[in-house]
Image: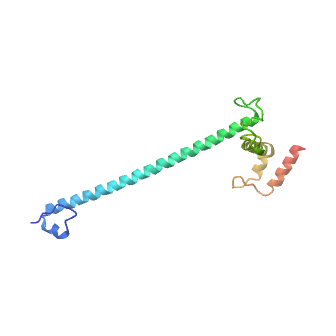
Amino acid sequence: RHKATSNAAMGDADMEELSYEERAKIRQKRRDERRASLEAEQKKMEDEREERRKKREAERLAREKAIEEEYEGCVAADRAAAGIGRGTLGRGGGGRGAGGGGGGGGGGSGGGESAVVAAGLYHFIVDQVLFDADLAAAHRTTTPGLFADGFDAALKRHTLRRFL
């Protein structure tokens, strides 16, 4: 009898010459090798998935940090423009950053600060002075931020009454 033990070199003809027990052992060995191969591939895929998850998490944290820093910068710019905060009272240039000129901006970092202040003032005026919650409730639709016909005219009348 020819006894081949290598799985790769053993063909169907060679398998027929072996005893039932030997063939069963060889088949079991092949199944074990396939299972090990599949498990290794699955482990590799799980590792890659975990790596992608960690990368996404790191990107999310970086975005959150950037947003937080931008927010803190806006708050600091608002405080500087208003003349409040750490050491900004009494400084020349309306609390703007140090810098010599800078063209039409009027300071080193002044261009963005005035835009932030203007945006904050705009939102305050629209939300607190001009907006009326009763009018909004009367003209509400199912879409958030969208009001029914006649809301613009009613808001204009309300605004005119407030100022007269």
Q: Quadrant of the N terminus?
A: bottom left
**31 or 2, which lies in front?**
2
Q: Quadrant of the C terminus?
A: top right
**123 or 14, which lies in front?**
14
Q: Report the residue at 66% width, 39% height from top.
A: 73
| Residue that extends furthest to the front in the rendered view of this protein | 100
Q: Quadrant of residue 80?
A: top right
Q: Report the residue at 18% width, 59% height from top.
A: 25
**119 or 88, which lies in front?**
88
Display coloring: rainbow
| Residue that extends furthest to the bottom in the rendered view of this protein | 13
| Residue that extends furthest to the left in the rendered view of this protein | 1
- Please state the horizontal and vertical placement of residue 45, each as a whole percent of the image: 39, 54
Q: Looking at the picture, does residue 101 appear above or below residue 8?
A: above
Q: Looking at the picture, does residue 128 appear above or below residue 16?
A: above
Numbered marks: total: 0
10 vs 104, left or right, is left
**108 or 68, which lies in front?**
108
85 vs 5, left or right, is right
- Please state the horizontal and vertical placement of residue 77, each as a whole percent of the image: 71, 38
5 vs 56, left or right, is left
Q: Report the residue at 81% width, 56% height from top.
A: 150
- Please state the horizontal and vertical placement of residue 3, each as a whole percent of the image: 12, 63
Q: Report the residue at 74% width, 38% height from top.
A: 100
- Please state the horizontal and vertical placement of residue 23, each as a whole percent of the image: 17, 63
